[in-house]
Amino acid sequence: MTDCLTIVGVQWGDEGKGKITDLLADRADIVARYQGGANAGHTVVVEGRKIVLHQIPSGILNPRSLCLIGPAVVIDPQTIINEFQELIDAGWIVNPERLRISSQAHVVMPYHKTLDKLREAARTKGKIGTTGRGIGPAYEDMVSRAGIRVRDFCNEERLAERLHALLPERNAVMQFLGGEPVQVESVLEWARPLAARISDYQADTGKLLADCIGRGGKVLFESAQGTLLDVIHGTYPFVTSSFTSAPAAFSLSGIGIARTGVVLAVVKAYTTRVGEGPFPTEDFGAFGARLRENGHEFGATTGRPRRCGALDLPALRYTFRVNGVTSIALTKMDVLSGFDSFPVCIAYDVPGRGRVNELVADDFTTPGIQPIYESWPGWSEDIGGVLSIESLPANCRAFIGRLERELGVPIDIVSTAPDRESTIVVNPVW
Ligand code: GDP
Ligand code: IMO
Ligand code: MG
C-alpha cells in the first residue's frame, strides 16, 4: 500500500478537508500541514463535539499520529496557543510528543495583521476579502527575506536584532497606509510569553518525515484552502498567498518527490467561495440561498456567509490536472437532498475559445465567459448519515456514477453528514 496520501481541496476551500483528514488519520503515522496558516478553518465533528482547527493538523484528534506543522506554514503564535487550550479543554492531549512545529516556519507578527487590514481598507476597488489573519504580509516577508522564523522568534536576542533591522520599513508602510508605527520593545513584550509556550514544539519536521517514510511509515499531508485559491494556479489576484496544490506538499515539506502516492481530492457536491473574485457558477437566487441554508455555509474562520452555486465540472477538470488527482472524497451530498433537480455546469462558452469542457486559469477572468448547465435529477430522501452506497436513492447513485465518468477518477469516499461516522468508504484509499 501507499505510504503518502495528500488531501487537497480542489475548489475555493471549505470542501471538508478537515473531516476527511480526521477520518483517514487512523492509518497515518504522521499528519502534516504544508502551507497556509490561521486563515484555514477545518471542522471536525467527533462524538457530537465540533472542533475547528486553524493551524494544528486535523490528525490531532487521532491518538495514533504525530502531527507536524511544516516550514511553509505561517504560524500565528497566539492563535495556536488558543487552539492548544481549546483542545486540552475538550479532553485531547497536545504536547510535543503529539505535535511538532518546524523551526523554519515563519511567524505571523502583529504588524502583518495590521498591514493585511490596512491594505484591504485602502483598496477602493479590487478588494480581495482576505481573512485579515496577516497571511499575505507574512508570506511577502518570507520571500523578501524579511521574515521572522520560529527559531528567531524563540530566541529573544535574535528576535530583537531582526526587529531592529526590519521594523523601520514596515512602520513606514503602515504609516503610509494610515496606521500607527510599532516599537521593538512592545513587540518583544508581546512575543516573550508566546515564545516560551511554543519553543519546546520546535523540530526539523522534514527530517521527521523522511525518517518516518524510511521506516516504512505512512504520511498524510493535509492542505489548506483550495487549488482555485493557489497563488500560482488559482484565480489570481483573488487568491491566498501560498502554494495550495498537492504537488507542493513534497517540496514545501522538505522531502523528495519519489513517492507521490495517492492524491485525494475533496470535492463538495456544489461550489462555494468566501471573499471576492470570480465564481462563474455562483447562484444569486433560490438555489444558492438554499445551499447556504442547508449546508450551513458560513465561514469557519470569519463567520462570513459563503457564496454558493452549482458544481463546476470544467473547473474541476482544471484543478484535477494541476493536482494529479487519483481519488475523490465527495462531501455534502446530503445538502442536495430535497431538490427535484439541480444545475451542474458541464462546459463553458469562452469568448475566443468556443465551447470547452476544461477551463484554463485565464478563463476565470475572461469577460463574457458563460457556464453551460445541465439539469440533473434530484432526490427527495434525506440521506444525512446514510452508511452504504446501496442505501442511497437511485438518482443520488446516478449522480455519483456520472461524476466519476465525467472526471475520470474514482469516488472512493462519500460523506453524508458532518460527523466522522457519517461516511461511506467505497474503497480504502490507503
Ligand atoms: P475545510 O476547510 O475543507 O476543512 O471545510 P470546513 O470545515 O471549513 O467546511 C466544511 C463544513 O461542512 C464543516 O462545517 C463540516 O462540518 C461540514 N461537513 C463536512 N462534510 C459534510 C457532509 O458530508 N455533510 C454536511 N452536511 N456537512 C459536512
Ligand atoms: P480552508 O483551509 C475558504 C480566502 C479568503 C480570501 C482569500 C485570501 O478552511 O479551506 P487570505 O486571508 O488567505 O489572504 O485571504 O482566500 N481563504 C479561504 N477561503 N477557505 C479557506 O481555508 C480560506 N483561506 C483563505 O476568504 O478570499
Ligand atoms: Mg474551512
Image (cartoon, helix red, strand yellow):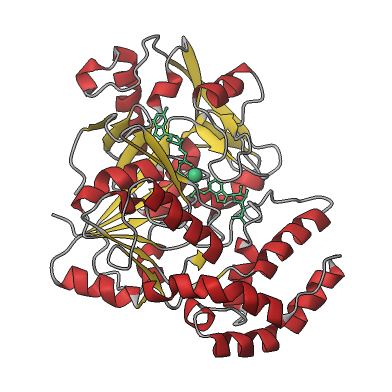
Q: Is residue 28 left or right of residue 127?
A: left
Reply above or below: 139 against 314.
below
Q: Is residue 76 visible?
A: no
The answer to whether residue 16 of the structure is visible from this angle is: yes
Residue at left offset 70%, top offset 61% = 116
Residue at image coords 43%, 47%: 9
**Residue 183 placed where, x, y %?**
75, 79
Q: Quadrant of the N terminus?
A: bottom left
234 on left or right of 105: right
For residue 117, what is the image quadrant?
bottom right
Towards the viewer: 185 or 5: 185
User: Residue at left 32%, top 40%?
Assistant: 328
> Where is residue 190 drawn, in percent x and y?
62, 72
Quadrant assignment, res 275: top right
Q: Is residue 162 shown left or right of residue 392?
A: right
* In the image, residue 118 above or below residue 390: below
How many labels, in total?
Answer: 0
Q: Nearer the viewer, residue 156 or 315?
A: 156
Location of residue 379 by image quarter: top left
Task: Find residue 344 and report its horizontal and vertical position in percent.
Answer: 49, 25
Report the side of 400 relative to 155 (left or right): left
Image spot of residue 96 (x, y percent) = 32, 68
